[in-house]
Amino acid sequence: MKHFLLKNSGVSISEEVFGCWAIGGTYFTGAEDAMSIAAIRSAIEHGINTLDTAPAYGHGHSENLVAEVIRGMDRRDVVISTKLPRSLLARENVRPSCEKSLRDLSTDYIDIYFIHWPSDKGDPIGDTMEELMKLKNSGKIRCIGLSNFSTEQIKEAEQYGEVDVIQPCWSLLWRYQDNDSLKYAKEHNIGVINYSPLAQGILTGKFPKNRQFDVNDGRSHASLFQQPYFNNAIDVVDALRPYADKYGVTLAQLAIRMCMQNPAITAPIVGAKSDAQVLDNVKACDFEISAEDYAEIDRISLAFTDTLPVFKSFFWQ
């Protein structure tokens, strides 16, 4: 598996990142701790050195599961990414929040520390970034990241500290950042670790049209899971099937590979709740989509995403 350096930080991430959101158990349903731990261990065994988590994923439960897996490992063998909650961006909350994650992760430093979302209550980004830079200079964190930030918000944050990596939502069904933050990141050598590359399962091809999700499943209110967008997205999936068949891969592997070959993306975050899912996901590293097919799949994708309204986010309309 390939690895990529984030700017001049010395942090090297794998070309596929293990996403620990689903195993937190509060947004998605069906996660079991024993299987989640086995999935993380399998990911590490298969060369995925980077684990992405956050306090919001299960109210700290995801971080605790990561801690259990890495206990006893050489800390240098794993890259841990976690996040500063949106509600704790005020200057006085930054260090305590980081220290809580350090305790929950049972580690003495965090490789990548993201601001999870921009402030929705007017916290000055300068105050937050200045505190993050202090944590970076003291060795508590190694990289500063911004998740769900627009290009203008990234530029503002850069006035107060170095941004090493961003984490946008991006998939073949969700591409609002193509000509905005992704382009800016590429031009300024900022890493891009995109989340939800499978559009929370739609691109796996396992959902029929008109599928209904339980009210306890966060996808029941997510933008793409509403009609008519959901059924139209399934049409995109059906259009991708011949390409998956051509390469002898699953639809999920095809969608992940498209992220990997996107020149603006460093590595996609791919979640898994079982060892079997990990084994399927890592196979996306084993093949190459031709330039001609990449262009055609890209065209199919854009024909759908260009018709979407401007949603507030992936999670709500």
Image (cartoon, helix red, strand yellow):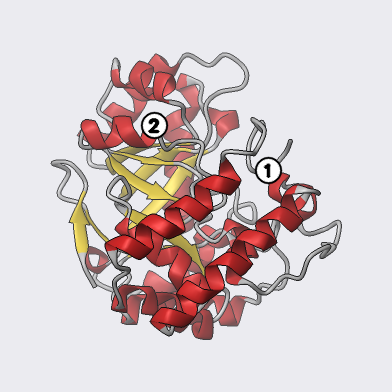
Residue at the location (43% across, 21% down)? Answer: 153
Which amino acid lies under the numbered mark 2 shown in the image of this protein?
A: Ser
Left or right: residue 133 versus residue 317 is left
Pointer 2 or 1: first along the chain = 2
Q: Secondary structure at mark 1?
A: loop
Left or right: residue 286 versus residue 38 is left
Q: Position of residue 37 (x, y in %)?
A: 51, 77
Left or right: residue 36 versus residue 164 is right
Q: Are the two marked residues, 2 and 1, in contact with CB atoms closer than 8 angstroms?
A: no
Which residue occupies the foreground of this view, 153 or 115?
153
| Inter-mark Cα distance, 2 to 1 | 19 Å
Which amino acid lies under the numbered mark 1 shown in the image of this protein?
A: Phe
Q: Position of residue 193 (x, y in %)?
A: 37, 49
**Quarter of the figure with residue 139:** top left
Mark number, residue 181: 2
Residue at the location (69% across, 49% down)? Answer: 224
Mark number, residue 315: 1
Mark nearer the viewer, 2 or 1:
2
